[in-house]
Image (cartoon, helix red, strand yellow):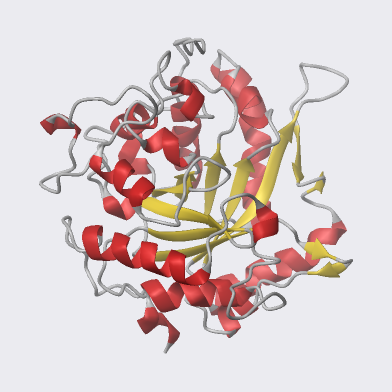
Amino acid sequence: MPPVTPQRALQPIDKPPENSSSTAAPGSSTPRIIVYHQTHYHNNEFVSMLPLHTEKTGTTHIILAAIHLNASSTSTSEAPFITLNDDPYTSPKYAPLLSEIHTLKTTSTIKILGLLGGAAKGSFHLLDSPQSEPGFRKVYTPLETCIRHLSLDGLDLDVEEETSLPGIIRLILALKSSFGSDFLITLAPVATALMRWGGVPGIGTRHNLSGFSYFELEKAVGSLIAWYNTQFYCGWGDMSSSEDYENIMLGVGCGIWPPPPPKEDELVGSTGMVWDVRKIVVGLVTNPRNGAGWVPDELVRDSLERCVNVFGSLDPPVEKSDGGGNVGTSFGGVMGWEYFNSMTERDGEGKPWMWARFMAEILRPEALS
């Protein structure tokens, strides 16, 4: 049985806001079309993000991966140094990336986030470990500087290592304190972690890479979390049908311990669901070479259309008057890992922006006109 995550009395930046439930409105219109961009150079050539805007793909967010906090090799008392993938984020190799961030921020409505963590472990351990406020600030301040340098609109917390609930809450509160209410904070759980019992310490931790319960996190600071980039691939979920998505939304249990039906206090409003449909983004791999679980075009179309038809028109109601391209469904959207070699069966490889356009054809066709 996996160990129970210890509950430690960390000192938060501030008190969580009252009524931080999942019914709070997410930070952008839906459905979202999100792409992760980690491979910035391929075959020694820079991979441009600009076609995601210029080719009218309907893309709403780009998440740059991956930011890592690295412990000093000489002294544990030194602040960590930060890299974007394998290089310092200030490296000259990222000058074209910074230029494109500026272009997108000034010529489009696309929001640019960064991914912290991911499969390379260590960043969240460094942020989670300090017991004191000065200790936390020593680790956090370099991250804050990196976010400002890259001019990011938000941060995606991809927690794939054991992290405490108080520790992740402290980080979220610090980010909101530093960057304000418009700064987008997202997380990237595996799909099973959002199924009931999928993240209960001592019962379902084998279904959750993060070490804390996303249900408890949502109860504590849900109003500060814009959405969840949910990984339905690599064995954690499957979008060749809508079954796994439905299991998350309806509170079906994960693993060999089927729980009883959700209690009334577990439901979001009058929807009969345990998650706010606006906050669950379906994560897909964009190429069979990017990980197990790639889904052919028509299968993924059928699955997403069922998700929208069954869940996308339910409460809470969606406003259509904003400038973000809201097309009138509360379905949270899709994200794709990753951009540089994205493909569809129809378009093949070589034009990675066409994957996002295909998703928009399914979910937000009005954005393509």
202 w.r.t. 325: above or below: above
Q: Is residue 44 above or below residue 265?
A: below
Residue 123 appears at what percent x and percent y? Answer: 66, 31
Question: Left or right of 112: which side holds 257?
Answer: left
Considering only vertical position in the picture, is 184 above or below 313?
above
Residue 117 sits in quarter? top right
Residue 211: horizontal and vertical position, in percent? 50, 23
| Residue 349 appears in the picture as rendered | yes
Residue that appears at 66% across and 71% down: 49
Image quadrant in which the C terminus is located: bottom left
Specify the quadrant of the image occupied by residue 251: top left
Q: Is residue 31 visible?
A: no
Rendered location of residue 266, percent (x, y): 19, 32
Lateral position of residue 86 relative to residue 336, left or right:
right
Camera-nearest residue between 183 and 257: 257
Residue 365 rendering spot, x and y as whole percentages: 38, 81
Name the quadrant containing residue 17. Answer: top left
For the point 60% across and 19% down, the residue is: 134
On screen, residue 262 above or below 317: above
Label count reads: 0
